[in-house]
Image: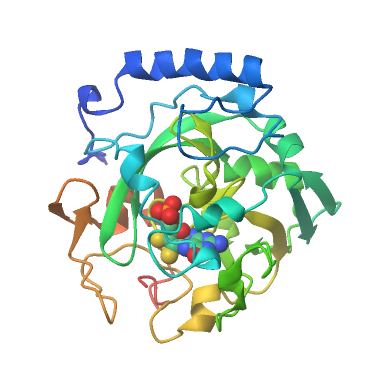
Amino acid sequence: MNIIRRKGWEIRESLATPEAVFLSRRALMKGAAAIGGGTILPGLSSLAYAAEDATAGLYPAKRNESYKLDRPVTAESVSSRYNNFYEFGLSKNVYSAAESLVTRPWMVKIDGLVEKPRDIGVDDLVKAMPLEERLYRHRCVEAWSMTVPWTGFALKSLVDFAKPLSSAKFIRFETFLDPKMAPGQRSFFPWPYVEALTMAEATNELAMMVTGAYGKPLGKTFGAPLRLHTPWKYGFKDIKSITKISFVEKRPETFWEAAGPGEYGFWANINPQVPHPRWSQASEEILGTGERKPTLLFNGYGEFVAGLYKGLEKEKLYI
Ligand code: MTE
């Protein structure tokens, strides 16, 4: 049987970041890395970079053109000023508070059902992975969205690196716990932030570990130095500032399941027909434009991920 795969949300290349802007930024970044040993020059951007980031020279990475958008990239001045990072406060305006996040040295623990558990410095991990840039849509359950040129690597590469045992069924991610540095962690939430995916989801080509954005190392407000991005799921799955990655047999309880089980579930796949108790999911505000667009099933990424959920129809797959 002939199956036509339609990508209903591809955009004209002219709507993405113009190549000239991208390339000149690339030259600028290389120069900055050479002069400052990885320290960004004053005035280049208001986002802060870790002075000791030994991977700064790897940005920008080559774009993987397989992932197209149906709308322009959100300006960095917008996406980096409207964030959820509850470790640093409940408002969207957390970027200056998030500057207290210390991102180097930064160790990542890989443990659980793996051949050999290990602790690895984030720079060594990044250097061992094939970095690339992907244009992805990002949809929050609060019904706003943005599009970001993320840099990072396929989560599958990390899974291959970790060598999980066949008994591993889920991958669990954990954020740092340091209430001194992150005052939000003194609040009632069940810290630290935890998220998880099935192994099938984690090894789907869309699942991405993010280490940069806009052709630079990741700004702190975006969850430096290492976060997750699963563009077919609501943004709360995209855990920031990861310190621990565990391969486990049982489905972990996530931060939001523990905080509000009536409102948030494990799967959190985007579906315009399944409302959250507080927000309709039918449409979304495109940040920075004042425009609303209808929301698409799996955020428009169904051709990549719909197959993951065959046989799981009894699960609460959406929110
Ligand atoms: N990760 C941690 N550690 N802490 C958080 O508060 N918020 C989540 C997710 N990851 C959050 C987190 C939510 S609710 C969303 S919508 C996205 O990060 C927001 O990502 P952004 O600020 O880059 O848009």
In this orientation, which residue lies closer to the viewer: 303 or 26? Answer: 26
Q: How does the figure colour the protein chain or chains?
A: rainbow
The location of residue 187, given as percent across then percent down, is: 56, 80
Q: Residue at x 20, y 72 (%)?
A: 280
Can you say which quadrant of the picture contains the N terminus?
top left
Q: Is residue 291 above or below residue 29?
A: below
Q: Residue at x 43, y 34 (%)?
A: 134
Task: Using the rendered view, name the quadrant where residue 190 is placed.
Answer: bottom right
In this orientation, which residue lies closer to the viewer: 186 or 74? Answer: 186
Can you say which quadrant of the picture contains the C terminus?
bottom left
Task: Using the rendered view, name the quadrant where residue 263 is placed.
Answer: bottom left
Judge left or right: residue 44 versus residue 110. left
The location of residue 202, given as percent across then percent down, is: 56, 53
Q: Residue at x 54, y 48 (%)?
A: 220
Judge left or right: residue 141 versus residue 247. left
Q: Is residue 133 above or below residue 33?
A: below
The location of residue 165, given as percent across then percent down, is: 77, 56
